[in-house]
Image (cartoon, rainbow, N blue to C red):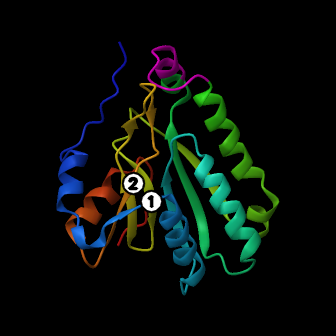
Amino acid sequence: MVDITFPLTVPINKILDVLNPRLGLLNSTEVYDALTKMVTESKSKNDLHVSIGEGDFLVSWIRRTCEHHPGKVKIGRLFIACLDDNLASHLEKLGLLRPGFRASMTSNIDLVRTDLAITRENIEVKVLTWPRMPPFHGWLYDGRALIAKWAINDFGHLNVNTMMIETNQSKSPDAYRRVFEMFPFPLPVG
């Protein structure tokens, strides 16, 4: 039996409950637009932290953003948090992830690492794995967070095709701090 829980002091539901509801839910088009605006209108380069499923949205978004906004993408480092290969394979065998999920995830990460448009923007890409099933998927950039829970689709597979909640450090400092602290890799202090 595989442990797909994530040990948290505060479960993701509690975090989602304290987010400012006025910031609302975002669909994939709104997430795409919000992310593009965040990274192209920032005054300085910041780290982008992403917790992915398969990573297909990340590949599509970052490629297009780098191609359509050359020299304006303010990402210093891109930290990609993904499922551990062994866990992804195991969850596929259990039928909790669609067949080919792990291969697609790995391929998408490789595409991000080697894409010419991303390379031209001098974005350093770092990949780290969640120790267990991630408590959420989403994005952190310059004091803003776009996050959502994993869901179960009509085929019974875990996926990240869910509406996202947006919060930020100034309007919901407690919720933002909790999300910030859950990422499985070193984050800048402050």
Q: Which element is circle 2 on? A: loop
Q: How far is disc 1 from disc 2 in space, using C-alphas?
A: 5 Å
Farthest residue to the front: give it.
Answer: 154
Which quadrant of the structure image shows residue 68?
A: bottom right
Quadrant into which the N terminus falls = top left
- In the image, residue 66 lies at what x, y percent? 71, 69
- In the image, residue 116 lies at what x, y percent? 82, 60
Picture residue at 18% right of the left edge, 45% below the top: 9
Please name whichever residue, 19 or 87, is drawn nearer the observer in this view of the structure: 19
Q: Which residue is mark 2?
A: 163
Q: Is residue 153 left or right of residue 8?
A: right
Amino acid type, callout 2: Met
Mark 1 touching mark 2, by CB under 8 A? yes
Picture residue at 58% right of the left edge, 22% below the top: 99
Picture residue at 73% right of the left edge, 47% below the top: 111
Q: Which residue is mark 1?
A: 27
In the rendered structure, which segment of residues is drawn in magenta? 89-99
Decide whether residue 164 is among the magenta residues. no
Which of the two labelled residues, at mark 1 and mark 2, occupies the earlier sequence position? 1
Please name whichever residue, 52 or 26, is drawn nearer the observer in this view of the structure: 26
- In the image, residue 172 lies at what x, y percent? 23, 71
- In the image, residue 37 lies at what x, y percent? 54, 77
